[in-house]
Image (cartoon, rainbow, N blue to C red):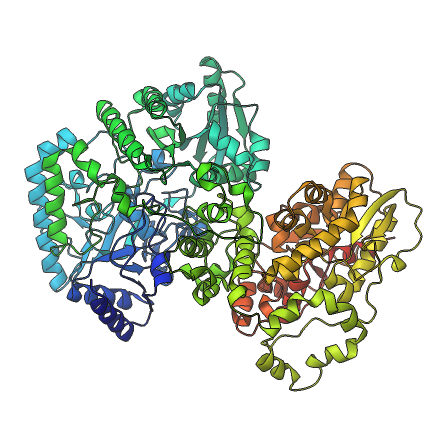
């Protein structure tokens, strides 16, 4: 398409649509990839505000002869959601449950509805949608329908094709047809009207004729396994049981655009029992699966040794692995039994234990009956793909024979022979997932940037295809065809059925505009021009301000640690989740691809590789892309591939401000620790901004601090370090890090901490520079502004001051999570080495220290009942990211009879100075309104609101008119 035609299309769409129309290079770059190995830049992107918007975009595209690509979460592993087309993203606005019939157990939903959101809405009615894919937190129903998704419990509930009753669909012409059940002898379902009814009759006639002609070929060629999603479901179109929706399911957007989808729901099972079966060899796990399936479980899922080992290295999953895995098994099977009564499930679990004993593996089953631990185990399994992709180095597990399915009786031999194929090509594979139905997620480890990467992929694919044919299995078992498997339809199904599929495509889409190149007329899967890492892929040399050497694993990553860290994002979209955890708070309120961790990582990768222009790494466009990243560190813990966008943003700002001067506001925030001693002495003057009418408005105009916000109040009675620590008889020493924020704005927190530590029998040493100079600082404000050289200066001063105490084994304790945890995190990137590592090992949050001492029997705090009955706790993002929330709860529970409840919240939205910035105040408050502020407002008068973060406390004050306090204050007030 010429630049002129593209400009004309862009202008027309903007003129006629209410939704977002995105044609800039950054937006097209963000939509050029999915979770596959491919990258194809779209013509443009439309984010429709309504169904009418989506239809109008489709009509305009048809009139202009422009291909259309419907897209949900964009997590396809086969390249279904990338292409040189107009992308229509349904996920932001077209995500509503339209009709729910609880009695009939059916629902009509829009295509952008996320599975977890749907199930949350269904749960109060005792219902769920049982196609429980591992990406349920981000997968949309439209995408699941297009892929014919399956999920862990398909053994009991079937695939999407068994659970979609109808699909109201727009064809590329703009005509509306309702694809649903057609009675024997009827010409159509009768649900469509007007021109749509006539078009539906044509389609029904075409499908029936195709089926009648190809019935024998379908019977001979279609694999007899439950997991088969290649091509179109023409084999399900018998005259006696024709449901046209079956043709839409698995069609990958090549036949039409789903307006709404009717789902078959199921009753939620009330009780579950989980057995974790340990196997000394992988072959045994595969060989014995068929015997386990005979016990009628709801799910049997495989986790191999590689996945177990990688999960142990991920902070979020390590505790679950340690609780449930015994020794070093070569593989485990997760066997779940589920139903309405507990006793039958418990009996089946006992049967499993007995069966494994009979099969020669007594004592191999870990029984899990606790619902919370079951949920945690399944979270590890659900993250399987992402855990595998956390593997560092040149090679990554690559999806192209991802979900071949073979009959269970051949599963062990198939996997053994496939392992031999990998070895023949000098590699190995990872295996996990749906053992119950003979469909494993198999990924050979390949370097797709290497010259021979594509050739190895082709050879392995050919040999795997031959194995699948030999065992009469399906080459595409769950994740669809897309770009990586469409060319393999003909080798499995034959040329005759491949032609029939092309004929079916023409019947629905005569112009060939719907997601071309998928299923029909596909390119070669190893066409490197379509790859994310194309033959000419290179990253620009960058002199980084932070140390990224941990990512320089493998020859191709030497000297390019920053780029390798960015490339760890595999586009799995886990950052688009809404169900739990912290990330990604800005996406949760904007729902824009630009403002999700994946979108930022894609833009950084494209900038680093020169695909967005020579100066993209220092561009305003990239600055805007990262502007709403609040550096919450949620992705550091919750992204299974370990993308740390907060650190990446600091690195970016370091480069950006080489060309673009910092604003006065940025400088005031960054240098706050250095002028704080003077500002505190001038507190009455410094606090005038919120006391004199008009000054707040003036500060917004001149500096950009939001007039709607009250700024932190400077205190003349600042915390004065060691002078405030009374002589102690304690024999155990502890260093207290008096951070800038608590020292000058809320000194009572530090005084409370001193009282608590003293009462516990500790001698407090307040951290101070050896030369008696200005107070110590962790460098957090400099990091947030990208002033890495200044942050390094502060880190050196901190190491010099604390080094002697650390060497003596004295713990370093801090109150402000972002400051204290910076010693455990960013210091290693600023000043890598033994000194930083030693300080990181010694640094503990106030609550971590108390919890550790209590567990060791060394803490004896004389606490009495609090004046409060309950504590409502909001965790600072960094506490969550570093697993430091359980100690907060443990510390509060030291207070007799104090009930403790943790708000299930993401970022509070203040995030340091972010929420004070005039351009971000609305987004900041919207973040807080997701869960935090409503919970605080609902808290009773006898509830103390607890938040350790300075900015968190200020957000609660501004947004809910409620005072929150630090844990140290709660404990100090309860001292006898």
Determine whether 294 is above or below 880 in the image: above
Where in the figure is residue 962, as x and y percent of width and height?
A: 68, 68
Of residues 79 and 499, the one drawn nearer to the viewer in this rendering: 79
Q: Report the residue at 32% width, 50% height from top.
A: 39
In the picture provided, is 498 more to the left or to the right than 701?
left
Where in the figure is residue 429, as x and y percent of width and height?
A: 39, 29
**Corner quadrant of residue 488:** top left
In the picture provided, is 469 more to the left or to the right than 433?
left
Where in the figure is residue 511, as x and y percent of width and height?
A: 12, 57
Determine whether 820 is above or below 293 in the image: below
Of residues 264 and 213, the one drawn nearer to the viewer in this rendering: 213
Q: Report the residue at 9% width, 51% height from top.
A: 187
Where in the figure is residue 314, as x and y percent of width and height?
A: 55, 39
Q: Residue 780: in sight, yes or no?
A: yes
Q: Residue 343: in sight, yes or no?
A: no
Of residues 158 and 259, the one drawn nearer to the viewer in this rendering: 259
Q: Report the residue at 74% width, 49% height from top.
A: 799
Of residues 643 and 75, the one drawn nearer to the viewer in this rendering: 643
Position of the N terminus, as image quadrant, is bottom left
**Corner quadrant of residue 774:** bottom right
């Amino acid at each position: 398409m010429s630049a002129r035609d593209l400009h004309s299309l862009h202008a027309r769409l903007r003129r006629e649509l209410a939704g977002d129309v995105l044609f800039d290079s950054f937006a097209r770059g963000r939509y050029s990839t999915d979770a596959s190995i491919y990258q194809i830049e779209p013509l443009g992107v439309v984010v429709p505000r309504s169904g009418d918007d989506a239809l109008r975009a489709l009509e305009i595209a048809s009139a202009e002869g422009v291909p259309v690509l419907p897209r949900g979460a964009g997590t396809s592993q086969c390249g279904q959601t990338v292409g040189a087309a107009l992308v229509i993203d349904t996920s932001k606005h077209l995500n509503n449950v339209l009709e729910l019939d609880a009695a009939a157990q059916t629902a009509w939903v829009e295509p952008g509805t996320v599975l977890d959101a749907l199930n949350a809405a269904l749960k109060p009615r005792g219902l769920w949608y049982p196609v429980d894919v591992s990406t349920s937190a981000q997968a949309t129903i439209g995408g699941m329908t297009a892929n014919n998704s399956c999920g862990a419990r398909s053994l009991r509930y079937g695939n999407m094709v068994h659970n979609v009753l109808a699909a109201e669909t727009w064809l590329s012409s703009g005509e509306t047809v309702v694809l649903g059940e057609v009675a024997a002898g009827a010409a159509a379902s009768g649900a469509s009207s007007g021109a749509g009814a006539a078009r539906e009759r044509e389609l029904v006639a075409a499908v029936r004729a195709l089926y009648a002609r190809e019935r024998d070929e379908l019977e001979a060629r279609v694999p007899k396994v439950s997991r088969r999603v290649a091509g179109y479901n023409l084999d399900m179109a018998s005259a006696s049981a024709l449901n046209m929706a079956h043709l839409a399911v698995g069609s990958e957007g090549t036949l039409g655009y789903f307006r709404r989808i009717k789902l078959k729901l199921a009753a939620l099972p009330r009780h579950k029992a989980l057995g974790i079966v340990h196997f000394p060899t992988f072959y045994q796990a595969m060989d014995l699966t068929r015997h386990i399936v005979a016990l009628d479980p709801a799910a049997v899922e495989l986790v191999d040794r590689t996945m177990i080992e990688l999960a142990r290295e991920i902070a979020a999953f390590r505790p679950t692995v340690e609780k449930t895995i015994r020794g070093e098994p070569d593989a485990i099977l997760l066997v779940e039994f589920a139903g309405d009564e507990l006793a039958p499930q418990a009996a089946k679990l006992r049967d499993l234990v007995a069966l494994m004993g009979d099969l020669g593996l007594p004592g191999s089953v870990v029984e899990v009956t606790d619902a919370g631990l079951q949920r945690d185990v399944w979270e590890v399994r659900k993250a399987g793909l992402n855990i595998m992709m956390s593997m560092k180095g040149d090679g990554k597990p690559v999806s192209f024979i991802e979900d071949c399915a073979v009959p269970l009786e051949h599963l062990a031999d198939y996997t053994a022979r496939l392992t031999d194929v990998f070895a023949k090509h000098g590699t190995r594979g990872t295996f996990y997932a749906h053992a119950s139905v003979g469909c494993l997620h198999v990924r050979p480890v390949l370097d797709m940037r290497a010259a021979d990467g594509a050739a190895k992929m082709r050879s392995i694919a050919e040999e795997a295809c031959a194995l699948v044919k030999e065992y009469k299995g399906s080459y595409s078992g769950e994740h669809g065809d897309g770009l990586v498997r469409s060319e393999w339809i003909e080798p499995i199904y034959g040329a005759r059925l491949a032609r029939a599929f092309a004929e079916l495509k023409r019947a629905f889409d005569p112009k060939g505009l719907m997601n071309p190149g998928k299923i029909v007329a596909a390119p070669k899967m190893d066409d490197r021009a379509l790859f994310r890492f194309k033959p000419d892929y290179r990253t620009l040399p960058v002199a980084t301000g932070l140390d990224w050497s941990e990512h320089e694993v493998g020859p191709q990553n030497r000297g390019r640690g920053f780029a390798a860290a960015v490339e760890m994002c595999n586009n799995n979209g886990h950052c688009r989740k809404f169900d739990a955890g912290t990330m990604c708070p800005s996406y949760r309120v904007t729902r824009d691809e630009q403002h999700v961790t994946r979108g930022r990582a894609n833009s950084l990768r494209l900038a680093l590789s020169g695909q967005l222009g020579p100066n993209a790494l220092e561009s305003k466009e990239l600055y805007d892309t990262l502007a709403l990243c609040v550096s919450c560190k949620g992705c550091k813990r919750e992204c299974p591939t370990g993308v740390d966008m907060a650190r990446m943003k600091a690195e970016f700002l370091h480069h950006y401000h080489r060309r673009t001067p910092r604003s006065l506001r940025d400088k005031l925030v960054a240098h706050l620790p250095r002028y704080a001693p003077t500002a505190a002495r001038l507190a009455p003057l410094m606090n005038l901004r919120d006391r004199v009418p008009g000054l707040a408005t003036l500060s917004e105009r001149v500096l950009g601090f939001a007039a709607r916000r009250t700024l932190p109040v400077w205190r003349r009675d600042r915390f004065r370090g060691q002078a405030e620590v009374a002589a102690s008889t304690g024999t155990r020493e502890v260093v207290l890090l008096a951070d800038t924020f608590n020292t000058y704005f809320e000194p009572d927190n530090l005084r409370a901490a001193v009282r608590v530590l003293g009462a516990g029998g500790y001698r407090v040493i307040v951290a101070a520079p050896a030369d008696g100079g200005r107070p110590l600082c962790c460098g957090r404000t400099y990091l947030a502004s990208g002033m890495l050289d200044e942050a390094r200066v502060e880190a050196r001063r901190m190491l010099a001051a604390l080094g002697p105490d650390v060497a003596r084994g004295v713990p370093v304790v801090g109150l402000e999570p972002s400051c204290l945890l910076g010693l455990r995190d960013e210091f290693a990137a600023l000043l890598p080495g033994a000194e930083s590592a030693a300080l990181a090992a010694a640094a503990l949050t106030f609550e971590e220290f108390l919890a550790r001492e209590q567990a060791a029997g060394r803490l004896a705090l004389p606490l009495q009942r609090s004046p409060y009955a309950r504590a409502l706790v909001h965790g600072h993002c960094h506490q969550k990211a570093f697993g430091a929330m359980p100690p907060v709860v443990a510390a509060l529970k030291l207070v007799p009879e104090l009930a403790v409840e943790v708000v299930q919240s993401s970022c509070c939205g203040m995030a340091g100075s972010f929420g004070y910035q005039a351009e971000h105040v609305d987004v900041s408050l919207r973040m807080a309104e997701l869960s935090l502020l409503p919970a605080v407002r609902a808290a009773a008068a006898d509830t103390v609101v607890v938040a350790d973060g300075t900015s968190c406390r200020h957000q609660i004050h501004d947004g809910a008119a409620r005072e929150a306090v630090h844990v140290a204050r709660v404990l100090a007030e309860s001292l006898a």
